[in-house]
Image: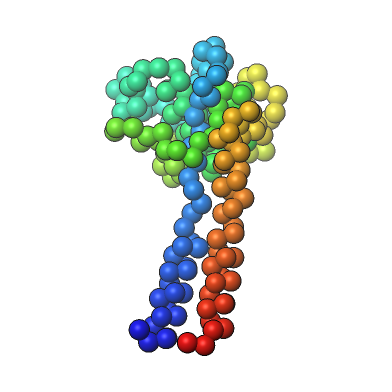
Amino acid sequence: MRPSLWWWWLAVAAAAVAGRPAAAAWCIARSGATEKALQTALDYACGRAGGADCAPIQASGLCYLPNTLAAHASYAFNSVFQRARASPGACDFAGTATITLTDPSYGSCTYPASPSTAGGQSGSPGSITGIPSPPGSDNGGAGDLGSGDDSGAQARRAAAAAPFLPLALSCLVYLLHTQRW
């Protein structure tokens, strides 16, 4: 391969890798949450203030089954979280939610992974993140990622590492460019 073509191919590959979005994240119900707290948070998320797209968890929706409080809350929490552009503070719901890097979608039920696929009402006024906290939350929407659960730490590490890739690729291209072939 001619050197000029090789550099062109390397530049295109580096741009493609650097332009990829960071790993997706979803907001789901925390396994230790009480039924009462989950119900309160679900009511909030599907209500006017939360603005989640809850149509898929209605009886005729693609995400109705399994018909469990945790499954329905997870879908609604994620809808609000994605609308907030996956802001970590938007996944708290009075301590009943946590972030996961594993896609919770199943069968024909697809969990939104971006604001454009999250549906629901457009931005609601409220906390700093644009998503007001549900009743019982004292943090103004700026909740933690995990509260004792490792998935929050994982999401923080992934977000912190995301800007490193373009820098590493730039260094590699520079080093390769300075070598005489």
Q: Give the percent coordinates (x, y) of residue 74.
A: 46, 27
Residue 152 lies in what quarter of the image?
Answer: top right
Q: Give the percent coordinates (x, y) of residue 17.
A: 46, 62
- Above or below, 147 relative to 83: above
Camera sees residue 40: no
- Relative side of 139 to 118, left or right: right
Residue 4 lies in what quarter of the image?
Answer: bottom left
Q: Give the percent coordinates (x, y) of residue 19.
A: 48, 61
Question: Residue at horizontal 48%, vertical 33%?
Answer: 78
- Above or below, 131 relative to 170: above
Q: Give the percent coordinates (x, y) of residue 133.
A: 63, 27
Camera sees residue 173: yes
Q: Residue lying at the far right in this picture: please name it.
A: 138
Q: Nearer the viewer, residue 178 or 60?
A: 178
Question: Residue at horizontal 47%, vertical 87%?
Answer: 181
Image quadrant occupied by the N terminus: bottom left
Question: Residue at horizontal 61%, vertical 24%?
Answer: 95
Q: Total number of numbered labels? A: 0
Question: Residue at horizontal 53%, vertical 24%?
Answer: 30
